[in-house]
Image (cartoon, rainbow, N blue to C red):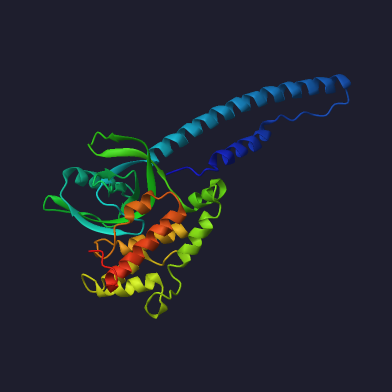
Amino acid sequence: MKFPSLAPSLLFATIITSSSAFLPSFSHSHSTVSQAWKKKTDDSFSTQLQSSEESSNDDFMASLQQRINQVEKRENKVPLVILDCMLPRQLMKIQVKNPLLMELVRTQMEKENPTFGMLGMAILTTGEKINLTTGVEVELLEKPVFIDEGVLMVLKAGRRFMITGEVDNTEQGWTEARVKYLDFQEQEEEEVRKSDDRMAVARAIMKAKELTTPNANMVNNVSLVDRWIELARENEKRPEQIDELLEELGEIPPEDEPSERALWVGALINPLPSLGVAMEIRPALLTATTAEKRVEIVCEGILKSIRHMDGTSKMW
């Protein structure tokens, strides 16, 4: 568990405040010599006490910071599995026959919040496959079932991360790496502060709005998202597949959270298991570095998927 970021300052303030309880009390004297001696003694004692307290505080803060660093170090080093490219909110129900992954699952299930890092692969235009360095933390939602030399498990994708340190092998045999967890709100605020194009996030919000507003190019002027859902229901591989998908994803994020909305739409049109009606955009979404780029990716992806399903422009 991470210590709150304010903990050191709060503890420090408590120490400084409580130190006044240790200051000695002296009886008043009308003697000038006594007063002079008292002042000299007070000053000397205060100096010694302050020096002692400062040294003690410095030692305490150094020790506390060391413990915090150790906790953060453990918290941000996660086991990694290259299995599939998942987006936040997505569910994966899978059976795997891999002894190393099975042992990792057993180990993680001993923890209060059993999780590990999930990475996917991207295919370059040259056909080369590369491992992504941006992925998602997945949580084991239900108790895994070990059968037939394999494991059945349900995974829920959560927060995104980026590998920031070296990738190492553990004693148990699986891979671990230091990661940095990513927050869209922080990323978008940083875009506004540091980007040369300060209107980029505003444009992303406007484009994100187009995903759920009436569209004159769609049948009955429905929105892009609503039209995709209509057509996808006609292409379900099993009954109520889209309804279940929508329940898993929850409500679409608001337009003023363009990156979150983009990932929601990406999870919609690239569900698990695949419907086979849209281009694979999940790797591009995870690696995109700006809100505007993420929204552009899903706008293009959902429009092409709609045209593919309604027959106006088949992709395959």
Residue 216 locus on image (x, y percent): 43, 76
Left or right position of 68 against 132: right
Residue 302 locus on image (x, y percent): 35, 65
Q: Vertically, is 21 above or below 52?
A: below
In terms of image quadrants, where is residue 56? top right
Left or right position of 99 against 171: left
**Front-most of 76 and 27?**
76
Residue 106 locus on image (x, y percent): 23, 46
In which quadrant of the rendered image does the C terminus lie? bottom left
Q: Is residue 256 visible?
A: no
Residue under the point 29% across and 70% down = 242
Q: Is residue 192 visible?
A: yes
In which quadrant of the rendered image does the N terminus lie? top left
**Front-most of 72 and 202?**
202
Residue under the point 50% across and 61% down = 205
Left or right position of 101 against 292: left
Residue 237 locus on image (x, y percent): 21, 70
Q: Residue furthest left?
A: 148
Q: Vertically, is 256 above or below 240?
A: above
Q: Residue furthest front?
A: 313
Question: How many marks overall?
Answer: 0
Q: Vertically, is 74 above or below 43?
A: below
Q: Vertically, is 59 above or below 151?
A: above
